[in-house]
């Protein structure tokens, strides 16, 4: 096969094609230079100018009053929940959401919340199902927890990288508001959603109270997320960041990577989406796999295989220099990112073809 795209993009030569996640990226030379030159202070004392610049930049992009730089997306979500709920409350979210599946039960351990799980086709919740899942302590004779926060994940990881439409986002935000709930977007890959849907992140976030924005996935920064929202919530979040151990000192070195990523790596996400679609289209024609092309909206490809074979398939691919991730016993995940080249796409397709059971 001939490479379907243009110039290779890999910055760090390797014998492996690492498609496990977009978290595996390393800082590019330009990003490393920006990090090395960053003015720093003590962010816990509030005087790291590069952190301040990043926070103001992200707040402005999302049209929110304040922003807070934190070490990870998991911490950003945890702080958002803790700052906007009380122990004994209930969080409403999709049943395969990152907050529920991949954050160690932090909503319970750190915030004392239970969770109400909402179904969703391809990871996308229906506003009617969200409303049905909201329980209130008032009027229940004390039997129910108080449903006080609705969380939306955009894009939906376990949905295959799918995106919410603007209409559904607004409807869910209205359901939350009408039921006296706070609303939060887990925007680990919200810029992927923005590029895919041609909607600005400001418009997506407009009706939501808080948004967690990850810098270390498709945007390519080594560390960090930013929580944005109203001043009142971010004032509380700042305290919880300290209590959860997220206060950092000369963090401007890391914030500089985030600034560089926002300046340089948003629009190029479309290239990741194109490469994912190319892989998915090829795999969909192979006899041993199945791919739902309707799910392939951003930089993820969920490949179905024979039940019980996913671990073996991951191993067979790694023997051919392709690293992927097992999701369950019949599904593997492929994620494209800024280090994946056109040649890598061809090599991945060829490896999948020859690895068929």
Image (tube, rainbow, N blue to C red):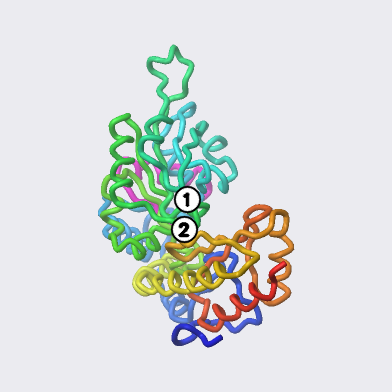
Mark 2 or mark 1, earlier in chain: 1
* Range of residues picked out in magenta: 225-248
Q: Is residue 331 left or right of residue 230?
A: right
| Residue in the foreground of this view, choosing between 131 and 351 | 351
Which numbered dot is residue 5? none
Q: Residue 3 at what x, y percent from top left?
A: 51, 85
Q: Is residue 217 magenta?
A: no
Looking at the image, can residue 268 be seen? yes
**Label 2 vs label 1: CA separation?**
7 Å
| Residue plotted at (37% across, 74% down) | 264
Residue count near mark 1 (Cα–Cα under 10 Å), binned few <14, some 14–19, many ≥20? some
Residue count near mark 2 (Cα–Cα under 10 Å), binned few <14, some 14–19, many ≥20? many
| Residue in the foreground of this view, choosing between 336 and 71 | 336
The quadrant of the rendering that contains the C terminus is bottom right
Q: Secondary structure at mark 1?
A: loop
Q: Residue 40 at what x, y percent from top left?
A: 41, 67
Q: How many marks?
A: 2
Location of residue 351 with respect to 186 vertically, above or below: below
Which numbered dot is residue 122? 1
Marks 2 and 1: CB-CB under 8 Å? Answer: yes
Q: Residue 300 at what x, y percent from top left?
A: 50, 63
Q: Secondary structure at mark 2?
A: helix
| Residue plotted at (53% across, 63% down) | 301
Q: Residue 325 at what x, y percent from top left?
A: 63, 62
* Farthest top residue in view: 141
Residue marked by disc 2: 295
Q: Is residue 247 magenta?
A: yes
| Residue in the foreground of this view, choosing between 249 and 226 | 226
Q: Is residue 82 left or right of residue 264?
A: right
| Residue plotted at (65% across, 76% down) | 351
């Amino acid at each position: 096969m001939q490479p379907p795209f243009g110039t290779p993009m890999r910055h760090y030569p390797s014998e492996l094609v690492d498609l496990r996640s977009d978290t595996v990226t390393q800082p590019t030379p330009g990003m490393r230079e920006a990090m090395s030159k960053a003015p720093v202070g003590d962010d816990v004392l509030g005087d790291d100018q590069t952190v301040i610049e990043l926070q103001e930049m992200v707040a402005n992009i999302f049209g929110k009053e304040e922003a807070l730089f934190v070490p990870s997306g998991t911490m950003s979500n945890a702080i958002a929940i803790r700052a906007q709920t009380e122990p004994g409350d209930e969080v409403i979210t999709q049943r395969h959401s990152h907050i529920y599946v991949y954050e160690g039960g932090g909503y319970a351990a750190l915030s004392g919340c239970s969770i109400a799980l909402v179904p969703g086709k391809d990871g996308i919740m229906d506003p009617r199902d969200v409303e049905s899942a909201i329980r209130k302590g008032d009027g229940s004779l004390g039997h129910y927890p108080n449903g006080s926060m609705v969380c939306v994940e955009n894009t939906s990881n376990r949905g295959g990288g799918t995106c919410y439409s603007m209409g559904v986002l607004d409807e869910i935000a209205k359901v939350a508001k009408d039921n006296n709930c706070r609303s939060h977007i887990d925007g680990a890959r919200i810029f992927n959603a923005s590029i895919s849907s041609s909607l600005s992140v400001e418009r997506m976030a407009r009706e939501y109270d808080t948004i967690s924005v990850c810098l270390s996935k498709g945007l390519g920064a080594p560390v960090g997320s930013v929580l944005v929202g109203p001043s009142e919530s971010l004032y509380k979040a700042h305290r919880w960041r300290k209590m959860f151990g997220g206060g950092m000192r000369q963090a401007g070195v890391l914030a500089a990577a985030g600034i560089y990523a926002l300046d340089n790596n948003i629009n190029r996400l479309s290239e990741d989406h194109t490469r994912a679609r190319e892989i998915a289209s090829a795999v969909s024609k192979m006899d041993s796999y199945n791919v739902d092309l309707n799910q392939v909206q951003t930089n993820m490809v969920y490949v179905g295989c024979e039940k019980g074979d996913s671990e073996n398939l991951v191993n067979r691919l790694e023997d051919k220099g392709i690293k992927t991730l097992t999701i369950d016993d019949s599904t593997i995940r492929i994620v494209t990112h800024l280090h994946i080249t056109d040649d890598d796409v061809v090599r991945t397709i060829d490896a999948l073809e020859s690895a068929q059971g």
